[in-house]
Image (cartoon, rainbow, N blue to C red):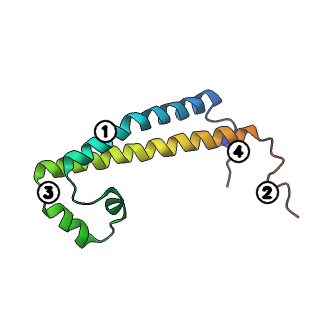
């Protein structure tokens, strides 16, 4: 896989911005997620809602919810997606920033027998 482009792009300044913006948006978005979760009155715990893979179980959760609660639940899910995207952005930037600090002495390609 050709990842050489990541040695120059994005710039160090852009990476630092990605890390900073990702971190700030995470802290702003988290209370919004909690608030929307409370407004939706989703009848399951957070862990159960993240690990529910059964269509019958999920449908049973939705049956007891009003249209307004379902609307808040959709907003909650969208906000959770933003949260996930910010996590990915922040950790990608941090990983790339740290990876560029190494000089390549520990590269698997150079140390193969």
- Which residue corresponds to the image point at 18% horizontal and 48% vertical from the top-left? 71
Residue that mark 4 sits on? 4
**Closer to viewer: mark 3 or mark 4:** 3
The percent coordinates of residue 83 (x first, y second) are: 40, 43
Residue that mark 3 sits on? 65
The percent coordinates of residue 64 (x first, y second) are: 13, 61
| Mark 4 residue crowding within 10 angstroms, few (<14) / some (14–19) / many (20+) | few
Residue that mark 2 sits on? 108
The percent coordinates of residue 79 (x first, y second) are: 33, 43
The percent coordinates of residue 96 (x first, y second) are: 64, 41
- Which residue corresponds to the image point at 33% horizontal and 68% vertical from the top-left? 53
| Mark 3 residue crowding within 10 angstroms, few (<14) / some (14–19) / many (20+) | some
In terms of secondary structure, where does tag 2 sit? Answer: loop
**Which of disc 2 and disc 1 is earlier in sequence?**
1
In terms of secondary structure, where does tag 4 sit? Answer: helix
**Which of disc 4 and disc 3 is earlier in sequence?**
4
Position of 45 compared to 105: left or right? left
Q: Which mark is residue 16?
A: none
Kindly check if marks 3 and 4 are in contact, taking CB atoms under 8 A apart as contact. no
Q: Which corner quadrant of the image does residue 102 belong to?
A: top right
Report the quarter where the N terminus lies: bottom right
**Which of disc 2 and disc 3 is earlier in sequence?**
3
Kindly check if marks 2 and 4 are in contact, taking CB atoms under 8 A apart as contact. no
Q: Which corner quadrant of the image does residue 91 belong to?
A: top right
Viewer-side residue, 19 vs 47: 47
Kindly check if marks 1 and 2 are in contact, taking CB atoms under 8 A apart as contact. no
**Which of disc 1 and disc 3 is earlier in sequence?**
1
């Amino acid at each position: 896989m050709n990842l050489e482009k990541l040695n120059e792009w994005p710039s160090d300044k852009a990476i630092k911005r990605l890390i900073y913006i990702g971190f700030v948006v995470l802290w702003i978005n988290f209370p919004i997620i909690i608030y929307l979760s409370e407004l939706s009155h989703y009848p399951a715990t957070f862990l159960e809602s993240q690990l529910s893979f059964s269509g019958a179980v999920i449908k049973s959760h939705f049956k007891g919810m009003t249209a307004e609660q379902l609307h808040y639940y959709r907003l909650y899910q969208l906000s959770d997606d933003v949260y996930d995207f910010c996590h990915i952005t922040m950790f990608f930037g941090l990983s790339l920033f740290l990876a560029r600090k190494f000089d390549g002495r520990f590269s698997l390609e150079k140390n193969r027998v």
